[in-house]
Image (spheres, helix red, strand yellow):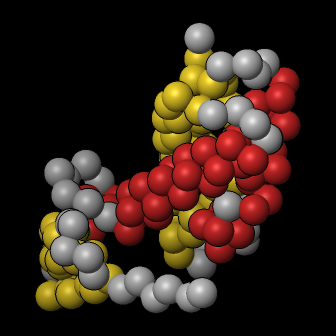
Amino acid sequence: MAFTRRSRAEWHGDLTQGQGKLELGSGAFSGPYSFQSRFGNDPATNPEELIAAAHAGCFAMALSAALGHAGHKPKRIESSSEVRIEKDETGFTITGIVLQIDAQVDGIDEHELTRIADEVAQSCPVSKALAAVPITHRARLLI
């Protein structure tokens, strides 16, 4: 079974003064982006923020599935992702991703949660797609 997902971007103007719009194919999100929202603090989205959201969402779902397969039904999983972008000699580069996972799961200890999260880090589809970038993750059991 294969699925194709689409999104769209539009850009007007030069790099630093221009502006654009990002739209998810599902229609769930449409919003502006600009140089300043990407490399500054303007209140709009940017590609790295969307990568972070996709990664956090995928990892939470993959961890839920892996915990279920291991006989541990999760009550709640909160996953956050930080995507770091830096300027180097060739331009801007995504240099690292950090995932923080907080999970509320009965009948499991933190060691087992970490072991399962380590496995998920190798199998999460978005993690695999982003494998060219160093990814670290930390899992914490919530009581």
Q: Position of residue 100 (x, y in %)?
A: 59, 36
Which sits in the foreground, 26 or 29? 26
Q: Residue at x 82, y 50 (%)?
A: 119
Which sits in the foreground, 108 or 24? 108
Quadrant of residue 125 within the rendered picture: bottom right
Q: Position of residue 51 (x, y in %)?
A: 46, 63
Q: Farthest top residue?
A: 143
Q: Position of residue 67 (x, y in %)?
A: 70, 41
For residue 32, above or below residue 134: below
For residue 133, above or below residue 64: below
Q: Position of residue 52 (x, y in %)?
A: 47, 55
Q: Residue at x 42, y 55 (%)?
A: 53
Residue 23 is left or right of residue 52, and the answer is: left
For residue 98, above or below residue 4: above
Looking at the rendered structure, the number of numbered marks drawn on it comes to 0
Q: Farthest front residue?
A: 71
Quadrant of residue 36 within the rendered picture: bottom left
Residue 73 is left or right of residue 11, and the answer is: right
Residue 28 is left or right of residue 93, and the answer is: left
For residue 116, above or below residue 131: above
Q: Quadrant of the C terminus?
A: top right
Q: Residue at x 65, y 19 (%)?
A: 106
Q: Is residue 98 visible?
A: no
Q: Is residue 5 visible?
A: yes
Q: Quadrant of the N terminus?
A: bottom right
Q: Residue at x 53, y 35 (%)?
A: 77
